C-alpha cells in the first residue's frame, strides 16, 4: 500500500505581561550662538544623566540599563519668505535610552525629565526579559508542533487512516515546497496615555503596556497509515 503523505503548518501564539520598557529621550536645542547652544544642551544632558544614574541598578532597577550618544552640533542657514538667506541657526542634540523594570517608576520618571529644557520623550518599546522570552518561545514552539500533529491526525482520520508519524519538522519554508511563511518573532505592543489623577488638579502620566504576543509557525510532514 502506498503511504499517504500529509504536510501541514502548525501554529501557536500566547500573550504575556510586559516585563521591561525601553524609553528613548532626546534633548534638542537651537540658537544663534554655537557655544551657548552647546552649553545649554550639556546642562540639560547632565540633569537627565543624574535622573538616570541615581536609579540605575542592573539587578534591582528601576533602570536596569542605559546608554547615551555623543552631543551632535550643526548649523543651517534658513531662508525668509522673500528668498533672503538669514543668519545661521545652530543646533545641538543628544539622545539617551533607558530600560525600566518598574513601570510605575517609569511614569514618574518621564514626568520629571519632560520638564528639563529641550527634552522630548520618544516611543516606548515593551518587552520580556531575555530569560522569560527564551522560556516562553520554547513553549510556544512546542505547542506549534503539537498543533501540527493534531491537524495531520484530523486529515488522516478524515480519509479513513488511523495514525500519523512525523518524518520532517522544519521552520517555515524549509521543507522545499514553497508553502512556508516567515516565522514570527516575539512582538511587543504598548500604549502611552495621559490619565488625570483623582486626588490632584494636575494630570499624572500613566503608562499602560499591552501584553507581549509570542507566536511560532512550523512546517511538518507526516506519513499516515
Image (cartoon, rainbow, N blue to C red):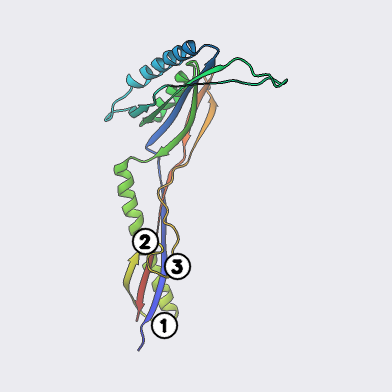
Give SS at disc 2.
loop
Q: Is mark 1 in CB contact (under 8 Å) with mark 2?
A: no
Task: State the image coordinates of residue 128 (x, y, percent, origin top left).
Answer: 36, 41
What residue is disc 1 on? 160
Foreground mark, 1 or 2, reads 2
The nearer-to-camera label among 2 and 3 is 3
Q: Earlier in the sequence, mark 3 or mark 1?
A: 1
**Tag 1's secondary structure?**
loop
Residue ID for mark 2: 171
Q: Residue at x 36, y 83 (%)?
A: 3
Q: Quadrant of residue 100?
A: top left
Q: Secondary structure at mark 3?
A: loop
Viewer-nearest residue: 86 or 15:
86
Residue at 49 percent of width and 30 percent of height? 122
Q: Where, quadrant-wise, is the N terminus in this rendering?
A: bottom left
As drawn, which residue projects farthest toward the left? 59
Sooner in the amino-acid sequence: mark 2 or mark 3: 2
Coordinates of residue 210 in the picture (x, y in percent): 46, 40
Above or below, 147 relative to 153: above
In the rendered image, the vertical position of residue 26 relative to residue 135, given as above or below: above
Frontmost of labels 3 and 1 is 3
Q: Nearer the viewer, residue 172 or 154?
A: 172
**The C terminus lies in which quarter of the figure?**
bottom left
Q: Which mark is residue 178?
A: 3
Q: CA distance from mark 2 to mark 3?
A: 12 Å
Amino acid at each position: 500500500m502506498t503511504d499517504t503523505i500529509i504536510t501541514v503548518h502548525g501554529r501557536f501564539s500566547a500573550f504575556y505581561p510586559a516585563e521591561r520598557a525601553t524609553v528613548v529621550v532626546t534633548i534638542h536645542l537651537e540658537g544663534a550662538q554655537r557655544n551657548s547652544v552647546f552649553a545649554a544642551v550639556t546642562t540639560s544632558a547632565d540633569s537627565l544623566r543624574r535622573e538616570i544614574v541615581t536609579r540605575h541598578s542592573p539587578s534591582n532597577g528601576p533602570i536596569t540599563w542605559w546608554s547615551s550618544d555623543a552631543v551632535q552640533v550643526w548649523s543651517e542657514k534658513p531662508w525668509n519668505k522673500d528668498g533672503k538667506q538669514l543668519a545661521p541657526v545652530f543646533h545641538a542634540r543628544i539622545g539617551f535610552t533607558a530600560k525600566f523594570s518598574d513601570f510605575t517608576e517609569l511614569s514618574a520618571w518621564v514626568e520629571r525629565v519632560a520638564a528639563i529644557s529641550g527634552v522630548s520623550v520618544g516611543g516606548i518599546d515593551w518587552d520580556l526579559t531575555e530569560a522569560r522570552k527564551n522560556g516562553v518561545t520554547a513553549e510556544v514552539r512546542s505547542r506549534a508542533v503539537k498543533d501540527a500533529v493534531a491537524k495531520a491526525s484530523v486529515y488522516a482520520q478524515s480519509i479513513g487512516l488511523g495514525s500519523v508519524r512525523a518524518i520532517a519538522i522544519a521552520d517555515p519554508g524549509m521543507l522545499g515546497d514553497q508553502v512556508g511563511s516567515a516565522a514570527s518573532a516575539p512582538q511587543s505592543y504598548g500604549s502611552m496615555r495621559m490619565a488625570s489623577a483623582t486626588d490632584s488638579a494636575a494630570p499624572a502620566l500613566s503608562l499602560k503596556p499591552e501584553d507581549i504576543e509570542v507566536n511560532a509557525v512550523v512546517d511538518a510532514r507526516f506519513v499516515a497509515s
